[in-house]
Image (tube, rainbow, N blue to C red):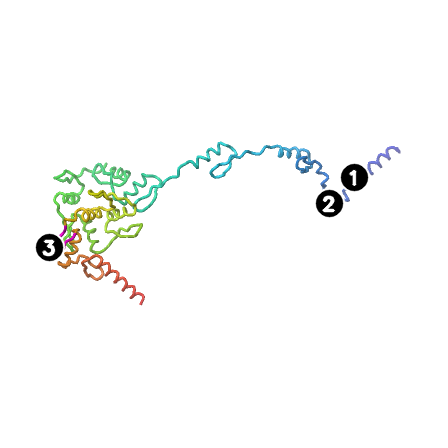
């Protein structure tokens, strides 16, 4: 019995001794649960300590791992971990840069030559793709093919030209075509003696009297009566000189300039003489302008006041004065 009581007392005393630290810890909650002395596994290389040997073992390979070999590009100093990636990157330097194809009329650039060729037809008006059925021409082959499909369900052309055999759907189209054989020019200018076979030609001609120039150069802003004149002018910006003098071979961007050069330089002996006063000129155009001083012809009409002028520059000066007067009236 005495032995049993002694054992019970030892158990109670042990439990009280185990509870003591718990009570003291509850009184001081700010004390950390683990101290620095618990991290007793230091790294022999860098001195970093760990609380578990497993963490230390995971850390050790950091010091034994070999550094990655970097392959550097000599052109741009960019680095790669694999030589194959470096070789692939080097090809970007060896590639030739794309040379843009530039339009000689408006200076717009294109990545492909065929796109430039198709674009330039807008300036030149070239239509190299004729319809196999009606002969209508197109600047784009796709447009031509789409147009040809419209003939599949259409009847044959009933109106045929007796001279060349060309046929048309409408009688009006045949009449217009027939003028190319007869030379008929039913559209006459009311301001001068010029006549035209088509109304479009008359409209274009009337701009020479009114001074209207609807076709503007995108580079210098100069205006022209027709798209054809604008296209010819575009050669002065591109530097192209397709018209060569047959005598000396000198190149010109415009056909008129070449003929003027040929006339003034190589054919000086041929002169245009005025029948009224005997004045001589090297150009026929200069002679016709001079003859207005004798005839009193005034082909340039002001659309604002109806006044006429013998010279185009006189009409321009007159319109400028009218514009200035209008501005003064508005400001006053």
For marks 2 and 1, give the CA distance. 18 Å
User: Of helix, strand and loop, which one carries label 3?
Assistant: loop
Image check: 228 left or right of 88?
Answer: left
Q: Nearer the viewer, residue 156 or 89?
A: 89
Which of the 4 quarters of the picture holds residue 46? Answer: top right
Give the residue number, with chain letter if any, for mark 3.
275
The residue depicted at 58 percent of the width and 34 percent of the height is 67
Distance from disc 3 to disc 1, alpha carbons, whole Å, reads: 142 Å
Q: Which residue occupies the extreme left position in the image?
A: 275
> Which comes before the other along the chain, label 2 or label 1?
1
* 287 versus 247 height, above or below: below
Question: Could you say where residue 225 lies in the image, as x and y percent from the top left?
Answer: 23, 51
Q: Nearer the viewer, residue 21 or 105?
A: 105
Which mark is on residue 18? 1
- Which of pointers 3 and 1 lies earlier in the amino acid sequence? 1
The residue that mark 2 highlights is 31
Q: Position of residue 173 (x, y in %)?
A: 17, 44
The residue most toward the bottom is 332
How many residues crowd around disc 2 within 10 Å: few (fewer than 14), some, or many (20 or more)? few
Q: Classify the position of the C terminus by image quarter.
A: bottom left
Q: Earlier in the sequence, mark 3 or mark 2?
A: 2
Whether pointer 2 and pointer 1 mark residues with C-beta atoms closer than 8 Å, the reply is no
Crowding near the residue tagged with mark 3, few <14, some 14–19, many ≥20 C-alpha atoms within 10 Å: few
Q: Point out residue 39 in the picture as x, y percentages from the top left corner.
A: 70, 38
Query: Judging from the image, what secondary structure is the residue with disc 2 in?
Result: loop
Q: Is residue 272 magenta?
A: yes
Q: Please give the name of the residue rendered at 12% of the width and 53% of the height, measured from the top-left corner.
A: 273
- Could you say whether the residue bearing mark 1 is in a helix, strand or loop? helix
Quarter of the image where the N terminus is located: top right
In magenta, the rendered stretch is: 271-281
């Amino acid at each position: 019995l005495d032995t049993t009581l002694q054992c019970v007392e030892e158990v109670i005393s042990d439990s009280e001794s185990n509870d003591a630290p718990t009570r003291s810890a509850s009184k001081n909650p700010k004390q950390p649960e683990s101290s620095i002395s618990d991290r007793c596994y230091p790294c022999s290389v860098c001195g970093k300590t760990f609380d578990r040997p497993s963490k230390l073992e995971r850390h050790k390979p950091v010091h034994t791992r070999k550094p990655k070999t970097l392959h550097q590009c000599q052109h741009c100093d960019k680095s790669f971990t694999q030589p194959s990636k470096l070789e692939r990157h080097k090809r970007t330097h060896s590639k030739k840069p794309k040379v843009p194809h530039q339009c000689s009329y408006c200076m717009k650039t294109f990545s492909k030559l065929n796109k430039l060729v198709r674009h330039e037809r807008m300036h030149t008006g070239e239509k190299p793709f004729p319809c196999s059925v009606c002969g209508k021409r197109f600047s784009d082959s796709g447009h031509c093919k789409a147009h040809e499909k419209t003939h599949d369900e259409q009847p044959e052309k009933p109106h045929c030209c007796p001279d060349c055999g060309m046929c048309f759907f409408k009688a009006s189209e045949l009449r217009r075509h027939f003028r190319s054989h007869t030379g008929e020019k039913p559209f006459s200018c009311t301001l001068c003696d010029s006549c035209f076979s088509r109304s479009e030609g008359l409209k274009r001609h009337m701009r020479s009297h009114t001074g209207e120039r609807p076709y503007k150069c995108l580079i210098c802003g100069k205006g022209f009566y027709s798209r054809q004149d604008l296209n010819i002018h575009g050669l002065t910006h591109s530097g192209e000189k397709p018209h060569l003098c047959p005598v000396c071979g000198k190149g010109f961007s415009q056909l008129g300039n070449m003929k003027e050069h040929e006339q003034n330089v190589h054919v000086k002996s041929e002169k245009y003489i005025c029948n009224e006063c005997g004045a001589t000129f090297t150009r026929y155009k200069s002679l016709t302008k001079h003859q207005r001083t004798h005839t009193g012809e005034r082909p340039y009409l002001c659309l604002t006041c109806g006044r006429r002028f013998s010279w185009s520059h006189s009409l321009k000066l007159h319109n400028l004065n009218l514009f200035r007067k209008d501005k003064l009236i508005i400001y006053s």
